[in-house]
């Protein structure tokens, strides 16, 4: 019997896919549960995993020359996660992806899915969507550092995902914003001081 969540997810992803192809894709999908701290994709791994986060939170980070972990990306419920290096560039991942809390994903091997749906127009649309989504995420991140102050990046983060600050440490928030925990504390104080009493 087919998992109704898988059917719903793939029908949304591949609008117009016929039932025979949908069945092939679903059979190649697996649900995986990650424990807090569990690594999903390791730096140096050439991972073709493409996953939809059903619930939970995944952090992508890089370790710099000083040994500090720099948060590059956070992904949460109803978002897709994959190693951009591996999927787009066919290179080993420069980053480590790990669960910050109990996380459930629906995952598929991108290469296998590509072979399965070769020459299918519906897959070409989905692939285009994945690539655009990955590029958009990267551009948003770059643009936020060029066009926004750290305080504006912080306010945008709160707007995009209000409950996120209760789910991750200040250290991870600070490195995601490109600042120190001390600077994050100052930003919060400034925001609070501007609020009407």
Image (spheres, rainbow, N blue to C red):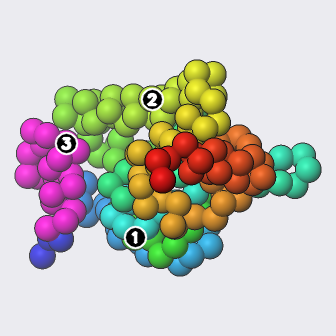
Q: Nearer the viewer, residue 155 or 80?
A: 155
Q: Position of residue 152 (x, y in %)?
A: 55, 34
Is 132 located above or below residue 18 in the figure?
above
| Quadrant position of the N terminus in the picture | bottom left
- In the image, residue 136 lies in the stretch drawn in magenta: no
**Of the pair 195 and 114, the residue shown nearer to us:** 195
Q: Which residue is mark 1?
A: 104
Sequence-first disc among 2 and 1: 1
Check if mark 1's residue and mark 3's residue have beta carbons within 8 Å. no
Judged left or right of residue 185, residue 51 is left
Q: Are marks 2 and 1 in contact (CB under 8 Å)?
A: no
Asked whether the residues under the numbered discs 3 and 2 touch, taking CB atoms below 8 Å apart as contact, a structural biologist would say: no
**Which type of secondary structure does the marked residue at label 3 adopt?**
loop
Q: Residue furthest top?
A: 147
* Magenta-highlighted residues: 4-22
For residue 136, the mark is 2
- Neighbor class of circle 3 (other Cα within 10 Å; few <14, some 14-19, many 20+) is some
Where residue 120 appears, as percent x and y from the top left, is 21, 33
Q: Position of residue 50 (x, y in %)?
A: 43, 51
Front position in the image: 38 or 112: 38
Pointer 1 or 3: first along the chain:
3
Decide: is 24 above or below 149: below
Asked which secondary structure carries label 1, the reply is strand
For the residues labelled 2 and 1, the Cα–Cα distance comes to 24 Å
At 61% from the left and 38% from the top, the residue drawn is 151
- Distance Cα–Cα, label 3 vs label 2: 20 Å
Residue marked by disc 3: 14
In the picture as drawn, the residue positioned furthest to the front comes out as: 197
């Amino acid at each position: 019997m087919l998992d109704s969540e898988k059917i719903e997810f793939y029908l949304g992803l591949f609008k117009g896919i016929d039932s025979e192809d949908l069945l092939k894709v679903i059979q190649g999908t697996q649900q995986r549960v990650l424990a807090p701290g569990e690594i999903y994709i390791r730096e140096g791994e050439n991972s073709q995993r493409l996953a939809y986060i059903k619930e939970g939170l995944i952090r992508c980070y890089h370790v710099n020359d000083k040994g500090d972990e720099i948060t590059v990306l956070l992904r949460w419920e109803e978002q897709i996660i994959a190693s951009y290096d591996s999927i787009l560039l066919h290179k080993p991942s420069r980053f480590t992806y790990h669960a910050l809390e109990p996380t459930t994903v629906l995952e598929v091997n991108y290469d296998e899915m590509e072979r399965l749906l070769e020459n299918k127009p519906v897959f070409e649309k989905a692939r285009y969507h994945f690539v655009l989504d990955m590029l958009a995420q990267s551009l948003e991140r770059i643009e936020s550092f060029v066009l926004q102050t750290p305080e504006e990046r912080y306010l945008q983060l709160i707007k995009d995902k209000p409950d996120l600050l209760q789910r991750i440490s200040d250290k991870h928030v600070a490195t995601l914003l490109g600042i120190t925990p001390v600077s994050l504390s100052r930003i919060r104080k400034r925001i609070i001081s501007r609020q009407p009493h």
